[in-house]
Image (cartoon, rainbow, N blue to C red):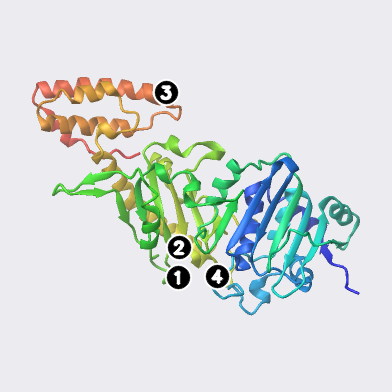
């Protein structure tokens, strides 16, 4: 007779590393996708069946035998990196695994009241079981040594036909959490850098792609750390601006920056990109803002935003979005992640080296951003004032036009108020004063005096 499957867990662990740690559908589904990646799956299918109050996630990874279910899945804290011969590689040896702590499975308990799981390893019988989260909580509350909770083994569903893989069904969903496709799809696209022909993730039958992240079509300027990223991002950035060099040659506003970190530890390389949009409002605001510089390790979000830690609060930052891929943060025995795996320990030597390098890169980017913005001219300034364009077009002397254009472009780049209407009103006052001052200097043939004023506006 088969031994019953048991889930042993302490109340504090369940509450603080499961129910209390994860607070959104994307964070929960992220953990399930990461487990599928670690299991060498090449397809993950997510079905949002909101009418029936359930989410189904199915993958064609290695799946589990009954023994694996008991000794790995139901063992909280089981870590393949320390317990298996491949350590930080998947069973196939072709992927670096994303999981480390063995607690990601607890994320499901924050989203659903009932968890139904069916899984099959190749050439093995399928096993199906149910976890009732409320019952588990009751047992954990009543126990001083942790709940020894027998999970309910059930019949394998007739529609589970995978030769190997796992299906997880979350039922009785948390009513306070957004579970719509429109909410989930872009957020998953921003949490992974591994979606590709060899790893498809679908929501309601449609692949998640990089385009779903929702900002590539608005990118104006692009800086990349590695050539592979440039080749991947540039075709998606359909609104990239161009500039003319001293010889009149036209170039896209795309530039490589140093991918190798200087100093100690040596030989650390990063990938990814930093980009800017022409208007901060295109990145949204508040909790929905995409004005972030996310850090990834092994293809998964490692820290949602590192921008506030770079020590530069100038308005230039509000135009930025990007991804930093730093696999060196998760390729050794050191666990640099907090429990949720969405923040990095700030005292870590490698993370400090990354921040130092990014601050250096920002100096280069900031100067080039200013030059490229000026090179766009006033007519390409977002929210340009048609009266100013009309005034610029009255100038016969190209030298006058160039000087006036530069002045108006500088004003157009300013942010004077976070409220768009108030910002526009303040700029209009500046435009009026600048036009009056410019015309006075032009009447006196003294426009050369403008050259004594720096043409760089530090924001």
Q: Residues within 10 Å of mark 1 (few under 14, many from 20)?
A: few
View extreme (bottom): residue: 85
Label ID, residue 422:
3
Q: Quadrant of the N terminus?
A: bottom right
Label 1 SS: loop
N-term mark: 2 or 3: 2
Q: Please determine whether, in this image, residue 235 is positioned above or below residue 160.
A: above
Q: Residues within 10 Å of mark 4 (few under 14, many from 20)?
A: some
Label 3 SS: helix
Label 4 SS: loop
Relative placement, left or right, of 365 versus 133 is left
N-term mark: 4 or 3: 4
- Whether residue 191 is visible here, answered yes or no, is yes
Label ID, residue 449:
none
Q: Quadrant of the C terminus?
A: top left
Q: Please determine whether, in this image, residue 306 is positioned above or below residue 277.
A: below
State the image quarter where residue 41 is shown: bottom right
Q: Nearer the viewer, residue 54 or 4?
A: 54
Mark 4–mark 3 Cα distance, whole angstroms, equals 51 Å
Label 2 SS: helix
Mark 1 or 3, which is nearer the eye? 3
Relative placement, left or right, of 288 versus 235 is right
Residue bearing mark 2: 353
Residue bearing mark 4: 95
Would you say the residues marked 1 and 2 are in contact, meaning their CB atoms lie under 8 Å apart? yes
């Amino acid at each position: 007779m088969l031994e019953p499957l048991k889930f042993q867990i302490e109340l504090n662990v369940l509450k603080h590393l499961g129910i209390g740690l994860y607070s959104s559908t994307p964070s929960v589904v992220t953990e399930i996708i990461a487990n599928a990646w670690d299991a060498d799956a090449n397809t993950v299918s997510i079905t949002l069946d909101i009418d029936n109050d359930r989410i189904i996630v199915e993958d064609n990874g290695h799946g589990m035998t009954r023994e694996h279910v008991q000794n790995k899945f139901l063992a909280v804290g089981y870590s393949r990196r320390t317990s298996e011969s491949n350590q930080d590689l998947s069973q196939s040896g072709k992927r670096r695994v994303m999981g480390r702590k063995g607690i990601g499975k607890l994320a499901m308990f924050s989203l659903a009241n009932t968890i139904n799981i069916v899984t099959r390893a190749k050439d093995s019988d399928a096993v199906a079981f149910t976890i009732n989260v409320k019952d588990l909580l009751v047992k954990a509350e009543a126990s001083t040594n942790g709940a020894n909770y027998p999970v309910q083994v059930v019949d394998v569903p007739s529609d589970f036909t995978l030769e190997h893989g796992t299906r997880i069904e979350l039922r009785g969903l948390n009513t306070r959490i957004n579970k719509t496709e429109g909410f989930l799809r872009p957020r998953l696209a921003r949490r992974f850098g591994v979606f590709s022909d060899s790893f498809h993730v679908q929501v309601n039958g449609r692949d998640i792609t990089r385009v779903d992240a929702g900002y590539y079509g608005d990118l104006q300027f692009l800086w990349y750390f590695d050539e592979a990223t440039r080749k991947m991002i540039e075709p998606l950035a359909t609104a990239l601006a161009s500039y003319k060099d001293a010889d009149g040659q036209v170039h896209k506003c795309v530039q490589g920056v140093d991918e190798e970190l200087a100093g100690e530890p040596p030989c650390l390389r990063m990938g990814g990109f930093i980009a800017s949009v022409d208007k901060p409002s295109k990145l949204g605001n508040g909790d929905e803002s995409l004005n972030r510089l996310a850090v990834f390790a092994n293809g998964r979000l490692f820290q949602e935003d590192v921008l506030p830690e770079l020590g530069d609060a100038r308005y230039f930052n509000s135009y930025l979005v990007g991804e930093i891929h730093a696999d060196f943060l998760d390729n050794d025995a050191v666990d640099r992640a907090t429990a949720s795996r969405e923040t990095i320990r700030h005292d870590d030597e490698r993370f400090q080296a990354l921040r130092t390098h990014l601050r250096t890169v920002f100096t280069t980017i900031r100067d080039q951003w200013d030059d490229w913005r000026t090179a766009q001219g006033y007519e390409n300034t977002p929210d340009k004032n048609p009266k100013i364009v009309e005034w610029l077009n009255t100038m016969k002397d190209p030298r006058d036009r160039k000087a006036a254009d530069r002045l108006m472009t500088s004003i157009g780049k300013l942010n004077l108020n976070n409220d768009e209407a108030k910002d526009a009103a303040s700029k209009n006052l500046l435009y009026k004063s600048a036009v009056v001052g410019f015309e006075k200097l032009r009447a006196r043939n003294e426009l050369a005096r403008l050259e004594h004023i720096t043409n760089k506006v530090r924001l």
